[in-house]
Image (spheres, rainbow, N blue to C red):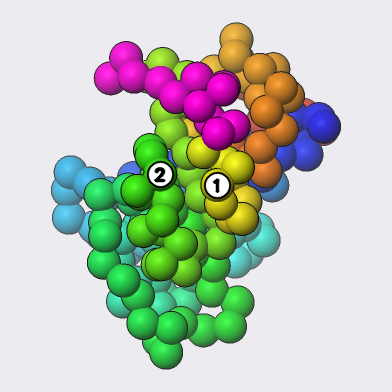
Amino acid sequence: MHIKNLKKYYFISKFEYSHLINLNQNISFIWRNKDKQTSSKDLINLRDFCKKYHRKLYISNDIKLAIKLNVDGLYISSKNKNLISNSIIKKKFKILGSAHNLKEIKIKELQGVNEIFLSPIFKDKTNQKLDLYKYLNLRRITIMRDVALGGINNKNLKKLKLIKPYGFAGISYFEQKKGPFKKGAF
């Protein structure tokens, strides 16, 4: 397994064309705007950018907005326990979700999640972590594709080879000025 073959997800809260255009094309975006009201203009610009450059876009915790904007899917945070009606979901709509433990994984299965973000795999700002062994144990109990989330940086990125996840996600990793996932890196 090569790191470049992993599915990559970047959590963003604002549309910055000059930054996003320089990222490798196989990075998908998850719009997550916790602190401020979502700007419709930013979201529409981001959606149009993703369609033009063949990127995937997911909206966090707002299924009505995701369907209205006709994006690729929905990201459901670990705190969101609401079930989703299958009747409102279009065919190619993908649902992503995050979990920290067995109980949350089972809730995400009920929500129809396709890929599960298990977090935090490495120490993050909260100083909590699953560690590789706990990560593997949680992954074994579900059939969903697993995505590593939390505390991933250039120093521990190679450790992902040990657990062979389907992908990884982050924020600060992709915001680095000189990272391996800039456009043209591979």
Highlighted magenta segment, given as a residue range? 126-137
Query: Residue 102: where, in percent of width, then height?
Result: 40, 44
Q: Nearer the viewer, residue 127 or 20?
A: 127
Image quadrant where one finds the N terminus: top right
> According to the image, label 1 marks what residue?
141
Q: Is residue 57 left or right of residue 166?
A: left
Residue in the picture at 36% in, 82% down? 85
Q: Earlier in the sequence, mark 1 or mark 2?
A: 2
Q: Nearer the viewer, residue 29 or 63?
A: 63
**Residue 160, above or below 18:** above
Secondary element type, mark 1? loop
Residue 128 visible to the viewer = yes
Q: Which residue appears farthest toward the left when viewing the image?
A: 36
Residue in the picture at 36% in, 58% down? 107
Image quadrant where one finds the C terminus: top right
Query: Residue 37: where, in percent of width, then height?
Result: 17, 55
State which quadrant residue 42 falls in: bottom left
Query: Residue 176: where, in percent of width, then height?
Result: 52, 21
Q: Nearer the viewer, residue 178 or 129?
A: 129
Query: In whole angstroms, how far apart are the C-alphas of marks 1 and 2?
Result: 8 Å
**Residue 109, above or below 185:** below
Identity of the amino acid at label 1?
A: Ile
Mark 1–mark 2 contact, CB under 8 Å?
yes
> According to the image, label 2 marks what residue?
102
In magenta stretch: residue 129: yes
Q: Which residue appears farthest toward the bottom when viewing the image?
A: 87
Q: Nearer the viewer, residue 25 or 106?
A: 106
Q: Is residue 18 left or right of residue 105?
A: right
Which class describes the residues within 10 Å of circle 1: few (<14), some (14-19), or many (20+)?
Answer: few
For residue 47, the mark is none
